[in-house]
Image (tube, helix red, strand yellow):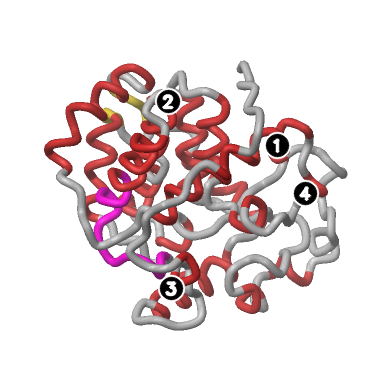
Amino acid sequence: MRVINIGPDPSLAYRPNLQKEKEDYRNFESGILFSRVFKTYSLMHTNQTVEFVKTKSSEWTQFNHTQMGMMDALMSLDQLVDESDPDVDFPNSFHAFQTAEGIRQEHPDKDWFQLVGLIHDVGKTLALWNEPQWAVVGDTFPVGCKFQNSIVLRNTFADNPDEKNPAYNSEYGIYEPNCGLDRVLMSWGHDEYLYRGMKHNNCCIPVEGLYMIRFHSFYPWHSHGDYMHLCNDKDRQMLPWVKEFNKFDLYTKNSTLPDVDELKPYYQSLIDKYCPGVLQW
């Protein structure tokens, strides 16, 4: 796939008009939702192992569960409230349109980017198909190597068997230096599932958008600069795009909910352009 010449870091371009201060987002220490968030991450950090990731990847990337169009998959998220998110307590479908509209305002010429904003969390449909949320939502991280300190609630890995396995708990673990993120096993969840689904269904989203889908929850990398020792040149070139996406994904979350019915025709046109028809899930 062609890589766009990105020039200066595009993450410098967006300065959101917030309803709350930036530092008030992603509070993993307190707040009215903290108990729910802590439980979700504790289960995630205990159970996301190399073996678990390989098992789930094999199970779900056959894409033989069901068939439906992208808009139907998106609207099914009306039924989902993300238990890992400390910032919102409303259905994930609203967050999808908030993100897309934020991108549309700042990047009116990049319709593929707007669509990525809309669909980036659609992989959370896994939680509607009997997967526990700790295996679907939340920040992602590599398995098979040392869990870095920048991972949210890092102290909840104590009961993860990979934490004590010398084959997995060194800086590189099972990986070679600068092997590239494409060769790294990420904790299983909605990011990897949707990325694989886009590839399986031959959706024509540019490589920048595919990186956003696959790694938007990889906060230790795009927000803290960890795991660079596993990255190759392509990963480093794509990082500014993932950082740019993150600003909309995070800072468009607010209590003002969009008029979904009004917005759907426009976004259906983008789906028809990039992810048309009935898809395999």
Q: In the image shown, does 45 or 219 lie closer to the viewer?
A: 219
Which mark is drawn over residue 235?
Answer: 1
Q: In the image shown, does 253 or 37 lie closer to the viewer?
A: 253
Circle 1 — which element?
Answer: helix
Location of residue 93 in the rendering, given as x and y in whole percent from the top left corner: 26, 48
**Would residue 65 be found to the left or right of residue 183 on screen?**
left
- Which of discs 4 and 2 lies nearer the camera? The answer is 2
Q: Name the residue carrying label 3.
A: 37
Residue bounds of the magenta highlight: 85-96
Q: Earlier in the sequence, mark 2 or mark 3?
A: 3
What residue is shown at x 75% (from left), y 53% (from top)?
Answer: 227
Q: Earlier in the sequence, mark 3 or mark 4?
A: 3
Residue 21 falls within the magenta-colored stretch: no
- Which of discs 2 and 1 lies nearer the camera? The answer is 2
What residue is shown at x 73% (from left), y 65% (from top)?
Answer: 148
Circle 3 — which element?
Answer: helix
Q: Name the residue carrying label 2.
A: 110
Circle 2 — which element?
Answer: loop
Q: Which amino acid does the dot numbered 2 rest on?
A: Lys
What residue is shown at x 46% (from left), y 63% (from top)?
Answer: 134
Q: Which amino acid does the dot numbered 3 rest on?
A: Val
In this view, 154 is above or below 279: below
- Give the class, few, some or many, for how many residues have Cα within 10 Å of label 2's Cα (few <14, many ≥20): few
- Give the class, few, some or many, for how many residues have Cα within 10 Å of label 3's Cα (few <14, many ≥20): many
